Amino acid sequence: MARPVMFSGRLERRRKNRRWAVVVAATLLAVGLAVIGVVAKQGFDMLGAADADWMPMLLGVLVALAGLLALCLVAYVAVRAYGRATSD
């Protein structure tokens, strides 16, 4: 039978903080992808009706995805920094 591993209270708080940061970043990513998807679909539908050039819209979607990934990283780091500042 495996014995449970004991961690210090500080280490447990850090582990919970890391999980919380991942949850915040993943939630932001999911919501952001949904919003980008809806707006991109509407935009591509309008471009299809107007027979316009798709390249600027495609570049806009790629820039939005890059911005979303950067925002998720910033949210992750911010939650980790807040947890570290308040845990001491």
Image (cartoon, rainbow, N blue to C red):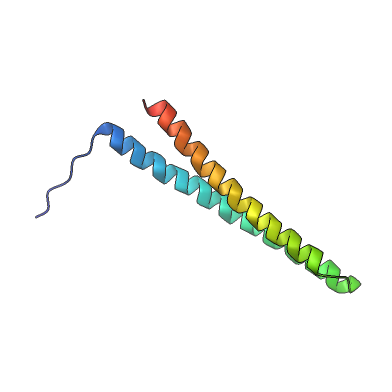
Give the vertical position of 88 relative to 55 (above or below): above
Tell whether 5 sits left or right of 29: left
Quarter occupied by the C terminus = top left
Give the vertical position of 61 relative to 24 (above or below): below
Of all residues, the one furthest to the left in this rendering is 1
Quarter occupied by the N terminus = bottom left
Query: What x and y, as percent, mark residue 18?
Result: 40, 43
Tell whether 6 sits left or right of 67: left
Q: Is residue 9 visible?
A: yes
Tell whether 44 sits left or right of 9: right
Q: Is residue 42 visible?
A: no
Query: What x and y, as percent, mark residue 21?
Result: 46, 43
Residue at x 47% of width, y 32% of height: 82
Give the vertical position of 52 relative to 26 (above or below): below
Residue at x 40% of width, y 45% of height: 19
Q: How many marks?
A: 0
Residue 87: name its quadrant.
top left
Front-lying residue, 51 or 74 = 74
Residue at x 52% of width, y 37% of height: 78
Give the vertical position of 13 relative to 73 (above or below): above
Query: What x and y, as percent, mark residue 80?
Result: 45, 38
Query: What x and y, as percent, mark residue 14?
Result: 35, 38
